Image: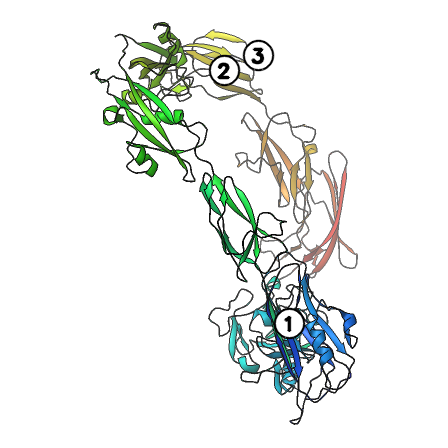
Amino acid sequence: MHFKLSKFILVLIISSCFCIKNWSQTYKSSDTPPVVTATGDQSYCPLSKINIVTDFNIAGGSDQIEAIYIQISKGYDKDYDILKLLNASLHPAIKAQEFNILEGKLVLEWTGSGTDYADLIAAVKDVVFENNDQQISGERTFSITIDEKNYLPSTSHYYEFVPDIGITWSAAKDKAKSLIYNGLQGYLATITSVEEAQLIGEQAKGAGWIGGSDAETEGVWKWVTGPESGKTFWIGSGNGTTAGTDIPFAFWNSNNNEPNQAGNEDYAHITAPNIGQKGSWNDLSNAGASSGDYQPKGYIVEYGYPGDPKPTTSTSSKITISKIVSFYDAERCGAGEVILSANSSDGGVLWFDSETSSIPLSSNNTYTPTITETTTFYITPKSCTSGERTAITSTVHPLPDIKKNITIKNCDEDGNPDGYTDFNLSNAIEQINNSTNNYTISFHYSEEDANTGNDAFNPDSFNNKNATNNTIYARVENTLGCFNVSTITLAVSTTSLPSGFMETLIACDNYEENDGYFAFNLTEATTKILDKLPNQNLSVHYFKNEEDALLKKNEITPQTNYINTKVDSETLFVRIENSENGDCYGIGEYLTLNVNPLPEFEVNTNEVICLDNPSAIILEPFNNLDTYSYVWTNNNNESSISGNTLEVLTSGIYTVIATSNSGCESLPKTSIVEESKGADISLDDLIIVDDSDNNSITINDVNNNLGEYDYEYSLNNEFGPFQNEPFFYNIPAGIHTLYVRDTNNCKTVSLEVSIIGYPKFFTPNNDGENDTWNIIGINSGFYPTSTLNIFDRYGKLVAKINPIIESWNGLYNGKELPSTDYWFTVELKDNTGKIRRKQGHFSLIRK
């Protein structure tokens, strides 16, 4: 291999890039290429610098080296990644080119000579990688090569972009196949992975051909070059798939729905950099466009086949971004010890007590502190003592805030005053809970069971004879599983109320359905009940059944708005107890609720007074369910008491309320009486468009000439159908009648309308169809004076007639005129003296 170059250049590339210079380096069998080696599989901490190698060497070789190229061939991020040569003053024989962001490449030129590569080796060891993105992730692979072409370590292949504006795909395929680099056969590139797609596509300087085609079978894309020749990688068009293919990878430009077969496009091509996704593919014809973004600017050559020896003139190194890969917060109920754990990509974890502290608390994957409150610790990978830290929280959940000891009381109402009765222990929950938190409470016979959560019993109907010494225990647990235990003492009262203790509330149905339901204010009964009892600070509670009253569950609240659950009448159970100590004073069925129905009837909701023929309207209720008295009210709030009817002479809103014999008033019923009147319309209210391709009539009532009511319209049919829209389109020429009526159907008025037009041809052959020609849509009523002149194509007057009384038959001086076009002028004078003039032409056709 010949390396007789005057300089040595080291290039570091962070992405896919193609060299503009198209050259291939060859060597004779006697040439001895140098061997380039590097070590360095390192961890990288965000926001730091790191040397790209831990060791580097160039050995052997019989020629001088001009350039070394260092490329980040995997994972390049052009917005944040950068390569630098540190300590440039220590490398006087090395010239570091400016880092190429587009290509991701750093070039080191060697100004020395011979085969002593010490300057180069030292310079490569001083090249560092930097990234200023706190969120950096993944890996970076660095290709280090003395070859100018791009080198991808994962494939051991070389790649280059060969500029050749306008080259066809077929020619590019042949040229690529003719190229050999370092003994490696060239071919149009085949892209089978994300790494190749990035390296080959994203930094291309122009649109370039690659080795894919569906010319053999439309929609079946195959690689037709290189070692992947004949293997499919895509089936379909822009909405196709890699499923079922030999190589399940493709990078079509989805922004443009590629491949789109926009004109015999059978060949794969890397899209121009400014079109859609950078480095993605599109399909083109063999020649592509003659200019612009879809004109081929060259082709991409890939060098290397399976089994080829790995190049000795290229090597690579790698860094892996250090990060916390997993961590687990800890929590507990109350103060105590917690176990925290985390894992990083490079082994152990450093634990800190703040984001800024410099002394780690531990370097193990687990950390076990004792805490009294929720505490946040901070972790980093073991190799990173600086940079952003990950927060990991130890949470201390509070124990439920409860009363440790309570007493609940109930009445002994089972007829046997033995001190035993049923309790609804759910009533204890409000007393136990000191807060508004939604705790889970279970009840147990012993304190031990309460602590372990074992042997809970149903609290809804518990008899105190099952308790030891009238004592049970409640386990109070929050949503996080933290619990406290409360001791409950059960107490029984044996008082009772006198017989005949009953109250009644009566109401009129206040629902539109008149369904026998009413929203009662039970506090009215409470006042009456307490007036019958001694002043002992008693409270009154209502329930739907005796069991609920006894167990004090499902209490009716609020008392101010209770809707009876049984139609027309319902009896409630009353529980009276001492508000101070909870002693039960008595329980019984002591309140009756009665609902009287509202009057039911109907009225006509809408009536109309026609002003063209006014007469009185009689408003009358009907479908009455009983005999009622009525009060009518007009919209001036004037009321009148009457029987079943009300005579109305004017429009307005009339409301009637009926009262039943039990004194219940109905909901108001309303009749709306409206006025209506026929329209007053003339031709002045119309906008007429005729002698056109779309004749129309528009009722233009901008000044409200028709009247103040609502109207609807029909054309040529007095009985409709009528429409609300005041316009008609596509009307044939002729005399038409417009009908207008008010929407209350009080009166219909009509108006004749002239729509003028003329035939485009006539056929005077005496077959009874189109034998004469005339202006259409005129009569003496609209245009009493009219003149029609007809001319031949030379301007000769061939007929002058009155179109009101006659038509032209195609004769001139009694002789038939030939088939051709004729011209006309017409002058129409209406009854007001206004003149309309029109001219045009038509065809005379003789068959």
Q: Which residue is mark 2?
A: 655
Query: In the rendered view of the protein, which quadrant contains the N terminus?
Result: bottom right
Instruction: Name the residue: 72% across, 80% down.
Output: 118
Label 1, on which residue?
Answer: 53
Q: Which mark is residue 636?
A: 3
Q: Position of residue 255 (x, y in %)?
A: 61, 62
Do the numbered discs 1 and 2 sit on residues whose CB atoms are within 8 Å?
Answer: no
Classify 282 as above or below 377.
Answer: below
Whichever of callouts 1 and 2 sits on the residue coming sooner in the sequence is 1
Viewer-closest of 379 and 283: 379
Q: Position of residue 647 (x, y in %)?
A: 49, 12
Examine the image and state in which quarter residue 205 appears. bottom right
Q: Earlier in the sequence, mark 1 or mark 3?
A: 1
Q: Is residue 454 above or below residue 543?
A: below
Q: Position of residue 371 (x, y in %)?
A: 50, 42
Q: Amino acid at mark 2?
A: Thr
Instruction: Look at label 1 and name its amino acid.
Output: Val
Q: Is residue 353 above or below residue 610?
A: below
